[in-house]
Image (cartoon, coloured by chain):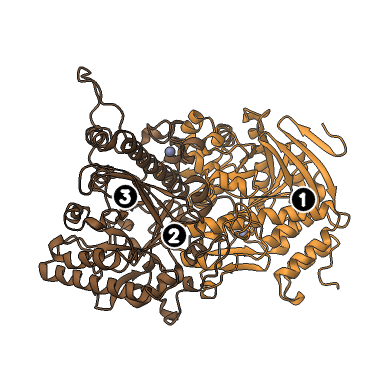
């Protein structure tokens, strides 16, 4: 791995910066930038050929918990992904199993983001993870061995997290820091034998700096000089000022945010704090809600003060389920220049129809569009930083805050058929949200029966 | 207008390229308003103007140049008004190749329990609000004109072939002929859209023949054999197809509606049919099933969890071709197994594979016909599908024997 900071603020400490993260054989990632968040190794609704052809996304976030379920009848089976043969074109098991294009940089974590909280909790030697067959313990040793087998470009060591919105009390927080510290020590000591150790981004916990300072100092003192530590995986970007103040040697490392920013406003704030790379689960959620992102950076110029008919803040996304899109042959959103496949080969009316008809292609097209909008947003951020420096970025970010509404609308459309055990504990269940489909008189369960299948497929 | 090899009508040209010297199989070229397609052909069903998660670009990548839309569904969503406003179904779905639409009648009968057929049309209750609605031949034509399909189907009076009511069957057949006349009269764009008739008559071969004669007298540019795939015995199905193709002119396309099992396609080609459609290949993909030359494999079975081979060895689809080849994805059975019923991507991948399989099966049949080795192709096909000859289905053996292929001979 090679990370270059191309342009940073002159002031001391952590702040917005432009950089480039490069892995041999992968498309270099210009930062600030984002990773697509995969589910079970797939970018939701997007087949690998479309990832290759139609997404500018150059990185993929993956969770080991998506690959290691133990089906009831086959409790002893070894996760198949560990045995995947590699090929010249798919030179790592992770790429080979998921068929992701070789150009895509992979990041492996124990858990998804957001992670479903476990009722069992972690132990001294294991993280409790949620698979398609339920909660199970993933030992730190198994995870370490998985990382060496699968060879992600970036590996994030296990962190002791509660995955709960409730702030842990200081006793629990201290244990989180101590356990993560022990696990990271174990991680680097086991890997010191490895001939090609993975690129490691160590977790920075979502607890105050004063509680985890020993752990963070160890990272800086023990693993930075040896070049074993290559980056930081940050669960709470608000710790960055403390990090800058107390642990300046860590500053040149690339910083990946796992803090799940909900909107582009949150992203801009984290960029200003010094985040280089984001895992952005909200893009998938927005697509499932039938929303097409419609923001740009820098934002459109503010209307002149004398223009009294000026519109207020614009929505961050267009709800394509709304009836006004039914016959619109325009691109999906007011971003008329969106270069994505959905906006160039199709139009709003088609996506509206697909959402109304609950056709899966609707969500595919929204994924292609939404990833393209976020990619263009980050390109705009980089250009602004590169050309105008942090002042221009801050000015444009202030303008962005005025130009767009603070949150996403909910989206009136029905979500895709509940396809994920992954979602059952988050978001309150799609089953209730969606009305039953009409006209299913011929029975979905008539598997393989051809009789009565003439004609139509619902 | 017809020469001895080609037939042209305002919106269609049919050229007979080759004929099997043993069976009734034919290879031909059908030119439609949105381009040329080679027959025999399998047409995937994009019911609601979308083929189950595939982008039109991906569908094009399978080699598909003619797919189905369903009139009944498009009439509900997006509705005729929107279809008119956007300029038809090709524009709606960004598909610059051909579209065939059904009349909408079959869906009413099969999806809606309360459909009631009178001379005027099909009466049913709106799935939106339960209000009574009526689909007439005129309304079906009007909808299909708004859709702008390259091939439209007449509204017919569909009855399950297994119905024991002979009088009702005759009534349905005769009414279908009368409805064809009303469809022809109501069709607004005969220069840009083709209207095909549908031969009815249940399993009664004489009634089928009578229907053929009546329909042929109306001289539509193409002919469909309807009312099959409703649960009749396969022997009966083959007898009906054979009885109809015997009477049909050489220089018009023949479409057997609603069939899609690979055996059914191969046998029907041998019996002289050219065009087929069915939702089975795409529906079964969503249940985790892959169609292969050795039969249907369910990727959800544990035996595929660590199977790193392609979905089908030797398959030329984008999923299965080796990753080292250009544009290939290098999808393994293990990956499909991993995501079957869990991520939509697995269904999309199997849909891509299954559609490609069906199209390729017809491409191979066509090549075999042109090279006059179709009987050998049929034997190889059944040899791959079944472990031994004793398990060949007797309906297929009998039907093929009727056109000169003895599957059981060595
Ligand atoms: Zn777009
Ligand atoms: Zn294939």
Real-space CA distance between mark 1 and mark 3, rounded to the nearest whole angstrom: 69 Å
Q: Which picture quadrant has residue B166?
A: bottom right
Whether residue A208 is visible: no
- The chain coloured orange in the image: B
Residue at the disc numbered 2? B343
**Viewer-side label of 2, 1:** 2
- Identify which residue, B56 or B374, lies in the foreground: B56
* Chain letter for the residue marked with disc 3 in the picture: A
* Chain of the residue under label 1: B
* Badge 3 element: loop
In the drawing, does residue A230 fall left or right of residue A89?
Answer: left
Residue position marked by numbered label 1 in the rendering = B244
- x%, y% of residue B40? 74, 50
* Image position of A429 (left or right of B290): left
Q: Could you tell me how many numbered marks the image carries?
A: 3
* Quadrant of the image where one finds ligand 1: top left
User: Which residue lies most toward the front here?
Assistant: A225
Which residue of the protein is positioned furthest toward the left in this rendering?
A: A170
Q: Identify the residue under disc 3.
A: A276
């Amino acid at each position: 791995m090679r990370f270059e900071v191309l342009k940073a603020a002159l002031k001391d400490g952590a702040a917005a910066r432009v950089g480039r993260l490069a892995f041999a054989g992968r498309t270099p990632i210009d930062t600030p930038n984002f990773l697509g968040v995969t589910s079970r190794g797939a970018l939701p609704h997007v087949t690998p050929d479309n990832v290759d052809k139609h997404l500018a996304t150059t990185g993929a976030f993956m969770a080991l918990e998506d690959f290691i379920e133990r089906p009831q009848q086959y409790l002893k089976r070894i996760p198949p992904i560990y045995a995947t043969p590699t090929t010249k074109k798919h030179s790592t098991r992770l790429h080979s199993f998921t068929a992701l294009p070789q150009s895509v940089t992979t990041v492996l974590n124990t858990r998804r983001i957001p992670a479903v909280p476990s009722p069992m909790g972690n132990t001294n030697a294991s993280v409790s993870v949620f698979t398609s067959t339920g909660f199970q313990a993933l030992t730190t040793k198994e995870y370490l061995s998985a990382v060496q087998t699968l060879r992600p470009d970036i590996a994030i060591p296990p962190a002791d997290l509660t995955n709960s919105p409730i702030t842990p009390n200081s006793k629990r927080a201290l244990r989180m820091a101590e356990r993560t510290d022990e696990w990271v020590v174990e991680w680097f000591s086991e890997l010191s034998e490895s001939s090609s150790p993975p690129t490691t981004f160590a977790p920075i916990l979502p607890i105050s700096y004063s509680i985890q300072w020993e752990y963070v100092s160890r990272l800086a003192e023990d693993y930075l000089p040896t070049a074993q530590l290559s980056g930081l995986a940050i669960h709470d970007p608000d710790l960055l000022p403390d990090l800058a103040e107390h642990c300046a040697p860590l500053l040149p490392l690339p910083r990946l945010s796992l803090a799940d920013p909900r909107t582009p406003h949150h992203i801009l704030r984290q960029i200003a704090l010094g985040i280089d790379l984001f895992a952005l689960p909200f893009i998938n959620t927005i697509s499932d809600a039938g929303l097409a992102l419609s923001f740009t950076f820098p934002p459109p110029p503010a209307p002149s003060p004398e223009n009294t008919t000026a519109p207020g803040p614009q929505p961050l996304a267009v709800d394509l389920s709304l009836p006004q899109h039914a016959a619109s042959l325009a691109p999906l959103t007011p971003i008329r220049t969106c270069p994505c496949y959905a906006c160039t080969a199709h139009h709003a009316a088609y996506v509206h129809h697909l959402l109304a008809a609950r056709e899966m292609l609707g969500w595919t097209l929204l994924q292609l569009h939404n990833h393209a909008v976020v990619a263009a947003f980050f390109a705009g951020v980089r250009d602004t930083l590169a050309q105008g420096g942090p002042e221009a970025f801050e000015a444009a970010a202030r303008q962005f805050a005025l130009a767009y509404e603070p949150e996403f609308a909910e989206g009136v459309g029905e979500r895709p058929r509940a396809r994920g055990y992954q979602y059952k504990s988050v978001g309150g269940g799609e089953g209730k949200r969606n009305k039953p489909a009409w006209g299913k008189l011929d029975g979905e369960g008539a598997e393989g029966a051809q009789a009565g299948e003439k004609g139509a497929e619902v | 207008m017809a020469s001895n090899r080609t037939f042209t009508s305002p919106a269609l040209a049919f050229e007979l390229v080759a004929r099997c010297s043993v069976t009734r199989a034919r290879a031909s070229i059908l030119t439609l308003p949105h381009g040329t397609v080679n027959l025999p052909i399998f047409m995937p069903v994009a019911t609601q103007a979308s083929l189950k998660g595939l982008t039109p670009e991906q569908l094009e990548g399978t080699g598909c140049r003619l797919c189905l839309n369903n009139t009944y569904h498009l009439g509900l969503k997006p509705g005729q008004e929107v279809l008119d406003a956007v300029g038809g179904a090709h524009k709606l779905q960004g598909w610059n190749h051909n579209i065939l639409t059904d009349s909408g009648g079959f869906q009413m009968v099969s999806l809606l329990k309360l459909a009631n057929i009178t001379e005027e049309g099909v009466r049913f209750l709106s799935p939106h609000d339960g209000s009574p609605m009526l689909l007439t031949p005129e309304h079906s034509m009007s909808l299909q004109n708004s859709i702008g399909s390259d091939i439209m189907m007449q509204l017919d009076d569909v009855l399950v072939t297994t119905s024991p009511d002979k009088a009702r069957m005759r009534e349905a057949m005769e009414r279908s002929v009368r409805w064809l006349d009303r469809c022809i009269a109501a069709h607004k764009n005969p220069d840009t859209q083709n209207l095909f008739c549908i031969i009815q008559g249940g399993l009664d071969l004489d009634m089928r023949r009578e229907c053929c004669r009546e329909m042929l007298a109306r001289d539509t540019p193409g002919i469909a054999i309807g009312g099959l795939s409703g649960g009749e015995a396969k022997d009966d199905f083959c007898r009906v197809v054979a009885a109809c193709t015997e009477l049909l002119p050489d220089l018009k396309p023949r479409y057997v509606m609603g069939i899609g099992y690979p055996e059914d396609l191969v046998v029907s080609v041998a019996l002289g049919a050219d065009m087929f459609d069915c939702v089975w290949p795409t529906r079964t993909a969503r249940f985790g099933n892959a169609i292969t030359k050795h039969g249907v494999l369910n990727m959800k079975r544990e035996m595929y969890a660590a199977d790193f081979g392609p979905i089908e060895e030797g398959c030329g689809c984008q999923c299965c071709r080796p990753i080292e080849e250009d544009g290939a994805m290098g999808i393994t059975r293990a990956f499909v197994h991993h995501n079957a019923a869990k991520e939509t991507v697995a269904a999309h991948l199997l849909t891509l594979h299954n559609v490609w399989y069906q199209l390729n099966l017809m491409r191979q049949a066509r090549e075999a016909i042109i090279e006059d080795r179709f009987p050998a192709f049929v034997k190889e096909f059944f040899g791959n599908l079944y472990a031994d000859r004793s398990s060949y289905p007797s309906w297929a053996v009998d039907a093929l024997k009727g056109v000169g292929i003895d599957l059981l001979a060595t």
